[in-house]
Image (cartoon, grey):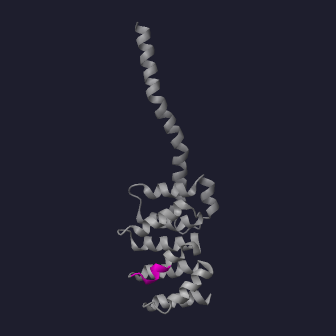
């Protein structure tokens, strides 16, 4: 009876800890990817290529979005992620940019990075969305929209030409004129 009790206790312990151990093993490679991507994003004054992100993470977008969702991530990291995501345009990136722009509490510079990222990633596909920011109350967002539309091909150029007449900010007009002269 004592042997049976010992056997049952051992089996129970194994059954309890086996899923936990398996989960820990499956998370370890993901944790390593998160750490590697965070390290690349956190580099100061270092140019990191898209290939470098792809070499350390099987899914750079998913890893960056995971980092972005972690608690206590510095605001500079959110901005870097918004900028870097443009290299991998997909539905997740589009949804992330839209979420930033819809967030009334989001930092202006984060929104500006999302606007430019949207232009870089999706170009003319998001021209209507980007054009609206040419007339935003915040000049920083207007300037970001100019940059984003200048990355949006002929559609963006057409939108910038049309907006030149209605834009009130001299800084935005100058930026549009520079974008059109390229």
- Residue 43, horizontal then vertical, whole percent: 52, 63
Report the number of numbered marks: 0
- Residue 33, horizontal then vertical, whole percent: 55, 51
User: Horizontally, is 101 left or right of 158 in the view?
Assistant: left
Q: Residue 156 is drawn in which quadrant? A: bottom right
Q: Residue 148 is drawn in which quadrant? A: bottom right
Q: Observer-nearest residue: 22 or 173? A: 173
Compared to residue 66, the image places residue 143 above or below, namely: below
- Residue 92, horizontal then vertical, whole percent: 52, 59
In the rendered image, the residue lying farthest to the left is: 105
User: Horizontally, is 106 left or right of 113 in the view?
Assistant: left
Write the start and end of the magenta stretch as one range: 131-136
Residue occupying the point 58% across, 54% down: 59
Please say whether residue 53 is one of the residues in the magenta stretch. no
Compared to residue 41, the image places residue 124 above or below, namely: below
Majority secondary structure of magenta residues? helix
Q: Residue 179 is drawn in which quadrant? A: bottom right
Q: Observer-nearest residue: 166 or 59? A: 166
User: Horizontally, is 51 left or right of 19 in the view?
Assistant: right
The quarter of the image holding the N terminus is top left
Compared to residue 88, the image places residue 168 above or below, namely: below
User: Horizontally, is 136 left or right of 35 in the view?
Assistant: left
Residue occupying the point 55% across, 58% down: 61
- Residue 87, horizontal then vertical, whole percent: 59, 65
In the rendered image, the residue lying farthest to the top is: 1
The quarter of the image holding the C terminus is bottom right
Residue occupying the point 38% across, 68% down: 106
Residue occupying the point 62% across, 82% down: 154
């Amino acid at each position: 009876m004592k042997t049976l009790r010992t056997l049952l206790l051992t089996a129970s312990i194994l059954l309890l800890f086996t899923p936990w151990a398996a989960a820990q093993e499956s998370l370890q490679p993901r944790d390593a990817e998160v750490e590697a991507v965070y390290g690349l994003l956190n580099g100061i004054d270092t140019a990191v290529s898209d290939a470098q992100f792809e070499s350390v993470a099987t899914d750079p977008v998913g890893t960056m979005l995971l980092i972005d969702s972690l608690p206590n991530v510095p605001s500079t990291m959110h901005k870097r992620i918004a900028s870097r995501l443009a290299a991998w345009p997909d539905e997740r990136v589009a949804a992330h940019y839209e979420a930033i722009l819809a967030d009334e509490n989001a930092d202006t510079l984060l929104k500006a990075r999302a606007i430019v990222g949207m232009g870089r990633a999706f170009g003319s596909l998001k021209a209507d969305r980007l054009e609206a920011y040419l007339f935003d109350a915040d000049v920083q967002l207007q300037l970001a929209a100019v940059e984003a539309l200048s990355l949006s091909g002929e559609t963006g150029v057409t939108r910038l030409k049309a907006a030149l007449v209605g834009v009130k900010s001299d800084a935005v007009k100058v930026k549009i004129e520079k974008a059109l002269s390229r």
